[in-house]
Image (cartoon, rainbow, N blue to C red):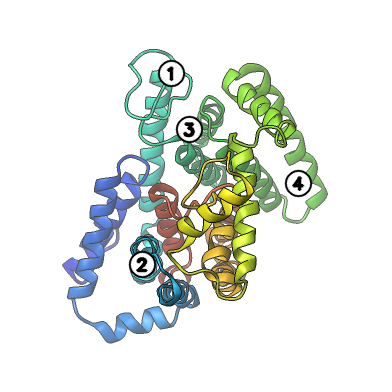
Amino acid sequence: MVNYQSSIDRIYQYLLITAFFFLPLAVAPNNIAIYLIIILWLVSGNYKEKLGHIIGNKLALASMVFFFIHCIGLLWTENISWGLEITRKMLPFFLVLPILLTLTRKENVNFYVGAFLLAISISELLSYLIWFDIIDAFKYATWDNPTPLMSHISYNPLLAFAIYLVGFKLFLGKSLKPFLRGLYVFFITTMSINMFITGGRAGQVMFFAVIVILMFQYFKHAKIKALIISSTLILAISFAAFNYSPLFKNRVMLGVEDIRNFDGNSNTSIGQRVTFTINSYQLFMSNPILGIGTGDFPDEYKKVNELNSPNVINTVQPHNMYMLILSQLGLVGLASFLTIFYFQFTLALNSRKVLVQNLGVAIPLLFLLIMWSDSYLLGHYTGNLYILFSSLIYSNNFND
């Protein structure tokens, strides 16, 4: 780690590494590290310079505007308590991401990424120990879905993102010594297998997207070759997973069955998501510009559900980030939300840093994909994954 002129700068870096490490392992230590960073930043003075860093970063400004639109949406909401809860969940876009964008340092990128990959490796090891019956299943895990530290809904996207990071080091990073190359090949193989002995379908879709992104980034001047290789890999991996992973096969067949029987039984995993989207679209159309308000989704959705689909369960969010924002905040909210991703792409494509050029494109692409199947920025693990790695890649410090 580099030398620092003040002890508080050093503390920031140790806390950031701690936050990256505990992200896949435990909620409390991850949150505590982030809270301590925010408190130190707020009480340590030098506010003019800090504010200048935030104003100078378009992503930070777009993120803060997105949060303030949620605050404005409270003005026409009737369910203030739920509106405040949603606003609290969006607080990282106002308080965490802009502040962390001023603190992450390019000199420490290997410490941040290494801490996260080490933690994912620990989680992966526990998953295999349960799967091989070496230890008993605990917390969220079962033998046939061994994700002990978090739900498979969150675990598989984090695992897919880790696979991208290892793939980047293998294919796009600096030249590696044989030992490190072998180690990364080992981890990308075991992580890929682990992807299909656990049951997160969105994470598995994200994994296939990772393959496509990596191949197009590696063969950036040979797009046909990238398409052929990525398609071949996806077909081969899908075939192997379908034939050798009972869980993956059962989840695929269940998904196909849900789609076939949607008209007769829409109260299934996929059927519910389709119904949520249809009903949420009706809410959006009732006020397409400004939405129904930050807190009114649960109450208004219940009314629509009772009319359109009384046999399907109610929900407090439609398991689709875009429909949630459209319902709550209308086209204004969605435009603000997409502006965040626009600036991510812009900053990445204009950067001269290889990591920023590639990971800076991968982050928004992967999240824009999986948010069709759930409101992933509301969850702790995937939300903090997005915030922490965005603060690293799009930091002015990294791109100086």
Question: Do callouts 1 and 3 mark residues in contact (Cβ within 8 Å)?
Answer: no
Question: Do callouts 1 and 4 mark residues in contact (Cβ within 8 Å)?
Answer: no
Mark 1 highlights which residue? 143
Which label sits on residue 183? 3
Name the amino acid, label 2. Ile
Is residue 220 depicted above or below 391 in this figure? above
Name the amino acid, label 4. Ala
Q: CA distance from mark 2 to mark 1?
A: 42 Å
Question: Do callouts 2 and 1 mark residues in contact (Cβ within 8 Å)?
Answer: no
Which label sits on residue 378? none
Between marks 2 and 1 in the image, the one whose residue lies nearer the viewer? 2
Structural crowding at the residue carrying mark 2, measured as other residues with C-alpha within 10 Å and reported as few (<14), some (14–19) or many (≥20): some
Between 141 and 19, which is closer to the camera in this rendering?
141
Mark 2 highlights which residue? 80
Residue in the image at 43% along x and 54% along y: 378
Q: CA distance from mark 2 to mark 3?
A: 52 Å
Q: Earlier in the sequence, mark 4 or mark 3?
A: 3
- The answer to whether residue 87 of the structure is visible from this angle is yes
Question: Do callouts 2 and 3 mark residues in contact (Cβ within 8 Å)?
Answer: no
Location of residue 61 (image quadrant): bottom left
Q: Specify the quadrant that holds the N terminus.
A: bottom left
Q: Earlier in the sequence, mark 1 or mark 4?
A: 1
Is residue 63 depicted above or below 23 in this figure? below
Structural crowding at the residue carrying mark 3, measured as other residues with C-alpha within 10 Å and reported as few (<14), some (14–19) or many (≥20): some
Which label sits on residue 226? 4
- Name the spot of residue 345 as percent of width and height, x first: 60, 67
